[in-house]
Amino acid sequence: MFLARMITRHKWQVKDDLASDEIPADAITADLRTANNTLSFWQCGQATESEVSDAVLALAAGRDRIQKLDIVWILTDELESDGQSIRLTRGKTPVVGLSERHVDVCHLDYRRLGRIGDRVATAIRQDQWKRFRKREIVTLLIAAMRSGRLSETGLTEKVQKEIRAAL
């Protein structure tokens, strides 16, 4: 099974002043920010297009506005082989059926967080990431609303206005 996390793709690009196997500190501090020594992920099964889109839907529906979103996915087995502790937790998303797909990687310290950074960098090099443009996210949100998985009232006022404008 894969776990997905939102990233800022351009921050992970190798910079001129770093070796090809080095990870920019800005990528770590921006995209792997922890809370209570945990890091949030969304389960995305075998990382099929549909499963990755569901992870993006869960994230996008909980945001304050609609904007492009980069997502990366990592094998759970690899995280576990690194000694990571993974715990199912209820995710904060208004999409019906997706809050149960949320997990936290727990008990993180400097070393364990660095291993996650290595896994993210490797996943990006292996093309285990995708950019969802604003229009694609609007399409996901509208489809979820039409199918009854998402209520407009679960979205922020700003997102509701953007959805109405797109209809």
Image: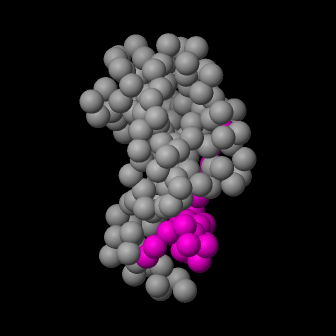
Instruction: Please state if 37 lies on the left or on the right of 119 as rendered.
Output: left
For the image, the number of numbered tags is 0
Q: Is residue 142 magenta?
A: yes
Q: Is residue 69 above or below residue 43?
A: below
Farthest residue to the left: give it.
36
Camera sees residue 10: no
Is 36 located above or below residue 130 in the figure?
A: above
What colour scheme does the image use? one colour
Residue under the image location 55 percent in, 86 percent down: 167
Residue 48 position within the rendered picture, expressed as x and y whole percent measured from the top left: 72, 47
Residue 43, position as x, y percentages in the image: 57, 41
* Residue 97 visible in the snapshot: yes
Q: Residue at x 53, y 55 (%)?
A: 97
Quick one: quadrant of the N terminus? top right
- Residue 103 drawn at (x, y percent): 47, 36
In the rendered view, tell whether residue 56 sits above or below residue 160. above
Q: Is residue 28 left or right of residue 100?
A: left
Q: Which residues fall within the magenta stretch?
A: 128-152
Is 47 displayed left or right of 32 in the figure? right
Residue 140 located within the stretch drawn in magenta: yes
Quadrant of res 122: top right
Where residue 156 sits, quadrant-wise, is bottom left
Q: Residue 40: x percent and y percent? A: 42, 38
Query: In terms of depth relative to the viewer, which is nearer, 16 or 158?
Result: 158
Residue drawn 46% across the image and 85% down it: 164
Residue at the image point whose x is 69% and y is 32% from the top: 126
